[in-house]
Image: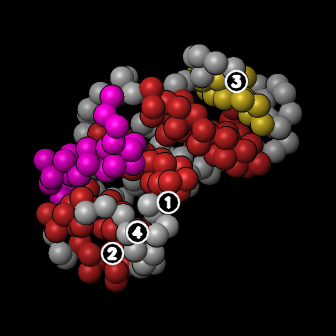
Amino acid sequence: MSGTPIDMREREDLCDLLAELGPDAPTLCEGWNTIDLAAHLVLREHFARGTDERMAAEKSKGLPALVDRLRGGAPLVPWRLPGLRTAMNGVEYFIHHEDVRRANGLDRRTDRPDLEALAWRATGFLGRRAARRIRPHGLELRPPEGGPRHFGPAGGAVLQGEPTELLLYLSGRRDGARVQLGGDAEAAAALRGAGTGL
């Protein structure tokens, strides 16, 4: 495994895939193709509000220019601070890399224990958020290895899958995530109908 930080590996791999697929390939982000996603990532890192005008201005530069800006790395502060670098950029770039991969028929990556660990940490925040949205029901996240995570009352919805799959589901990529949803039927229906996303 490379000593390169997760966020930089995911960024580079996503940039390679964007360059390979071109500007019009689909993503799991509803209504966005690859150039929309690249423009979003550039705007995000420069704290620019993603208005329609700014998105259009970034997109007018073309995908190769956007990919070049992304390859240049995040601005120095705060995206390069060690805690934020992994927690925010690592998660963001993993999710968006999967948005492009899965919308274009690429297989799930299974050889990345570092991504599973990162995803499991991120499910703490997103699991709490999802549980608030399905009150009075609780939520249990159940990975194949290790203990489950519980949010709210017991006996609620049970979401099972690899941590990366749980993260994708909880971040709004329901159609792209490989999970099993069970537990209490009413709680599971509430989770299915609850808004999720970052």
Instruction: Name the mark on residue 148.
Output: 3
Looking at the picture, the colour scheme in use is secondary structure
Instruction: Name the mark on residue 81.
Output: 1
Residue on which the image places disc 4: 76
- Does label 1 or label 3 sit earlier along the sequence? 1
Coordinates of residue 143 in the picture (x, y in percent): 60, 22
Q: Is 183 one of the magenta-colored residues?
A: no
Residue at the spot 34% in from the left edge and 80% down from the top edge: 54
In the rendered image, the quadrant that contains the C terminus is: bottom right
Please give the range of residues in magenta.
1-25
How many numbered discs, if any? 4
Q: CA distance from mark 1 to mark 3?
A: 30 Å
Q: Is residue 97 above or below residue 117?
A: below
**Side (left or right) of 51 relative to 181:** left
What SS does tag 2 mark? helix
Residue on which the image places disc 2: 55
In the rendered image, the quadrant that contains the N terminus is: top left
Coordinates of residue 9 in the picture (x, y in percent): 32, 44
